[in-house]
Amino acid sequence: MRTPTEWSVVAGAPMGCTMSKSSDAFASSRAPSTAPTDPEFSNASVQLVDRPSDGEFPSSGAENLHAAYPLYSAFGNRYLARQADIESNARTYPRSLPIALRAGRGVIVEDTEGREYIDCLAGAGALALGHNHPVVVEAIRATLAEQAPFQTLDLPTPLKDRFIRELFDSLPPTFAEDFKIQFCGPSGADAVEAALKLVKTATGRRGVASFQGAYHGMTHATLGVTGEPTPRRAVGGLGGEVQFLPYPSDYRCPFGLGGEAGSDIGARYIENLLEDPNSGVLPPAGMILEVVQGEGGVNPAPDDWLRKIRDITKRRGIPLILDEVQTGLGRTGRMYACEHAGVTPDVLVLSKAIGGGLPLSVVVYHRDLDIWKAGAHAGTFRGNQLAFASGAATIRHIMRERLDLNAETMGARLRRGLASIAEDASCIADIRGRGLMVGVEIVDDRAPDGAMRPAAPETARKIQHECLRRGLILELGGRFASVVRLLPPLIVSDSDIGAILDRFEAALKAVERGYASSASR
């Protein structure tokens, strides 16, 4: 892999072709680098596998790739052809990010064609320290050298004990005193499933309160508490009784108010719904919410609203489940997003970053809820020793280097830069987020003045495509997939942010020029 200072290479350009800042392809005034809190990173090496020969994989599906991958002409290769032949139609990311990755280091990934990208997806937030961070690599190597068993079910081990101590040290002090932990299967959805089973068992109730715009996973029960309709349509009987409640939003307020007035009336609506004996809503077994809705469009819950929800649920004996699968471990500028509001839930769901990039999920819950019997929740891969080692090392490094504060500082810098870009971009309606969890809402700028402008998913897709052409990976979310989402690793530096902004701005201008050209014809 080339060093960060050598990486101005664009899709379609010859290797070694350096593009100027004004170029549409790869506009960047500064090369990305790791955060100054990680000086050892520059001494790490990445072991790369050999590139395969041209005939290694069959490509019998190549003739169909233009239909399967609209961007194939720019980014296609035999790995995508092989994938189209043999993998499920449920695959998602390659449809909008048609690249095959072979290596990564820090905030940079390299594809099989030798092109390099700034990664603002970071495994959907799982790679808090970026790719192949030396702290994580060394933890895994040491574990292998010790010949630790790979899987131990729920038997205790020194690695597991160390992980628990590191995790509880990262949580507010009340957790260590009053909470217990349940290890789940490898994904966040497994932990949400466990949390729902826990509160139903503890309360004897069956219903669950969730929120519009929520995303909690793709398993059967977690889809039941997820607001996104697309994956739900073909599946019936999801999760029993679920009541969806309004989630606050400044830009798309469900009450048409926004701001403090919108969140206040939302809290009052929820309180009345639970208080009114004729509301048609039975007392739920629990209420589940994200402090910042991620897939739902990067919607942060106002601190005061979250405190009111905590008060409402506590007074009515409704366990509050906070899903911090994506927000946990420094992502929002605090170690845990609930700390912004000073709220302690009854149940905290964690995954993604806590495994240091390896699969791991847990539920941390108040001792009073611990009434389920032996075997009430189990799973083969809840004893992943490599994940315990990489997770403990990641937690310790984030705390020691205060990468939560780096996320707060760099996230503010990113939002300021995006706001400056938005001043000349009529398709950007809102920029929001917390820490390094940032969303840019893309709308149709042809709507009448004063009207709520409709989402513009096609424009958002074009921006994502043009960013990819310039070496920037990001994803879309929110209503109609019209929110551009940025989730760079927590080690991102000021120069990285500058490069991200340069590439995003160049991509946006290219899309705007394309629309202007279409309008003139």
Image: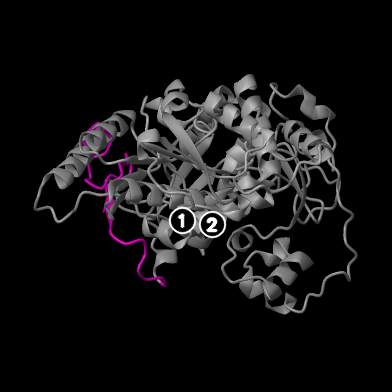
Confirm whether the magenta stretch covers residue 422.
no
What is the x, y in percent for residue 328? 51, 35
Q: Which residue has dot 2 on it?
A: 461
Q: Which residues are magenta?
A: 234-262
For the N terminus, the image quarter is top right
User: Which residue shows up at 47% across the image and 38% down it?
Assistant: 422
Crowd rating for badge 1 (residues with CA inside 10 Å; few <14, some 14–19, many 20+): many
The percent position of residue 169, horizontal first and vertical second, equals 55, 24
Left or right for 322, reference 133? left
Q: Helix, strand, or loop for circle 2?
A: helix
Helix, strand or loop at disc 1? helix
User: In the image, what residue occupies the spot 16% across and 47% down?
Assistant: 273
Asked if residue 505 lies left or right of residue 108, the reply is: left
Residue sitting nearer the eye, 84 or 244: 244
Whole-percent x, y for residue 378 in the image: 52, 53
Q: Nearer the viewer, residue 356 or 293?
A: 356
Q: Mark 2 touching mark 1, by CB under 8 A?
A: yes
Q: Is residue 225 left or right of residue 119?
A: left
The residue singled out by tag 1 in the image is 481
| Residue 136, image quadrant | top right
